[in-house]
Image (cartoon, rainbow, N blue to C red):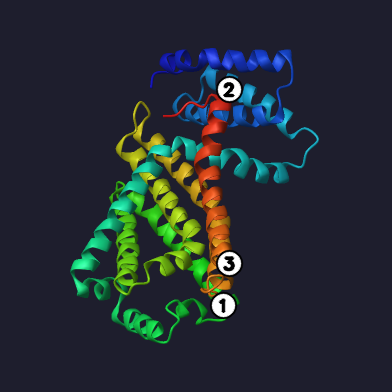
Amino acid sequence: MREAAFVKRNQERWQVIEQNLQASRPHPDRLAEIFIQLTDDLSFARTQYPNSRVTQYLNSLASKIHLEIYKNKKEERNRFITFWKYEVPLLLYQSRRHMLYAFIIFMLAGIVGAVSAIYDETFVRLILGDAYVNMTIQNIKDGNPMAVYGSMEQADMFFAITFNNIKVSLVAFAAGLFFSVGTGFILFQNGVMVGAFLSFFYKQGLLLHSLSVIMLHGTIELSSIVIAGAAGFAMGNSLLFPGTYPRLYSFKEGVKRGVKIVMGLVPLFIVAGFIESFITRYAFMPVFFKVLIIGLSALLILYYFVLYPAKLARHANLRTH
């Protein structure tokens, strides 16, 4: 993008920011949102116009806002709060189309897996493995279809599951390096596995029971994998479709955006690992508690990853690209 076009595109917004700073000190929440936008502009200007006056101007303006935000505050603590309160939600809003694509791919793959397992009895064994299928059939005969969730000591299971979930999310993200195709494959693979798993229990007459158990942790876990896929798409598509930005700059920004989104998922994987290790094993708990846990998990995902980012973006008048 030519410098003149860059300035023309953003000059009016910069002037409004500067006027607001001179007139009165904006609310801290608003300052943080403005700062995130300006640092994005400054990063682009430093890359494309390192010796330009517009770069110096943006650096000065961002410095003023930085001083206002961190005045009389501990920087590291404020940075930690800002990351989850502003940066991750705003990046999620920017990547909302990627989340939609990831969700669609995962759901379509789930349907493919479910239909394939219903019409081909060997498909489940191909996807889940003979050992797992045989073990589950024996558990069903013993009257506890979900006994696998109580087969390990809680703490060991927690660390193993949390590590595996984080690894899956990182793989889904990193696969975006292959022009987003790799991420799509990982999402499709996981979706087929979930669909085949549910079809297996459907054929055993245990669909509702299996759903009520696996979604205790699966609501957060599966949603997080989809969002990690969105992070992979954000990185891969930044390379494929740089828009008005230079391809290398677009790719760097896509990588940063994706990494921050994946980092924002770590607490969710910890929560999902805790639920799966310490709660899911009680498969025959009252239905009320199952509905409560699944409902709260769904509300958390819906609010933090969909509703709150949209609300924050409207408030900040966020520019997406």
Q: What's the CA distance linking mark 3 and mark 1?
A: 11 Å
Residue 179, position as x, y percentages in the image: 29, 46
Residue 154 in sight in this render: yes
When asked about the image quadrant of residue 70, the answer is top right
Q: Residues within 10 Å of mark 2 (few under 14, many from 20)?
A: some
**Amino acid beneath label 1:** Asp
Is residue 266 visible in this depiction of the protein?
no
- How many angstroms separate mark 1 from mark 2 (CA)? 50 Å
Question: In this rendering, is residue 228 above or below 141?
Answer: above
Q: Please tell me how crowded label 3 is: few (under 14), some (14-19), or many (20+) other residues with Cα within 10 Å.
A: many
Instruction: Say whether marks 3 and 1 touch (CB < 8 Å).
Output: no
Front in this rendered view, residue 67 or 105 = 105
Is the C-beta separation of discs 3 and 2 under 8 Å?
no
Query: Is 214 left, or right, of 159 in this rendering?
Result: left
**Label number found at residue 156:** 1
Cα–Cα span, label 3 and label 2: 45 Å
Q: Which residue is drawn at 44% across and 18% down?
A: 6
Residue 191 drawn at (x, y percent): 33, 59
Which numbered circle lies on residue 58? 2
Look at discs 3 and 2 and give the one toward the viewer.
3
Residue 177 rendering spot, x and y as whole percentages: 34, 50
Q: Secondary structure under badge 1?
A: helix
Badge 3 or badge 2: first in the primary sequence:
2
Disc 1 crowd rating (10 Å Cα; few below 14, some 14-19, many 20+) is: few
Q: Residue 243 location, x and y as percent?
A: 34, 29
The residue tagged 3 is 274
Sooner in the amino-acid sequence: mark 1 or mark 2: 2
Q: In this view, does 87 lie above or below 185?
A: above
Q: Please determine whether, in this image, residue 88 is positioned above or below residue 292.
A: above
SS of the residue under disc 3: helix
At label 2, the amino acid type is: Leu
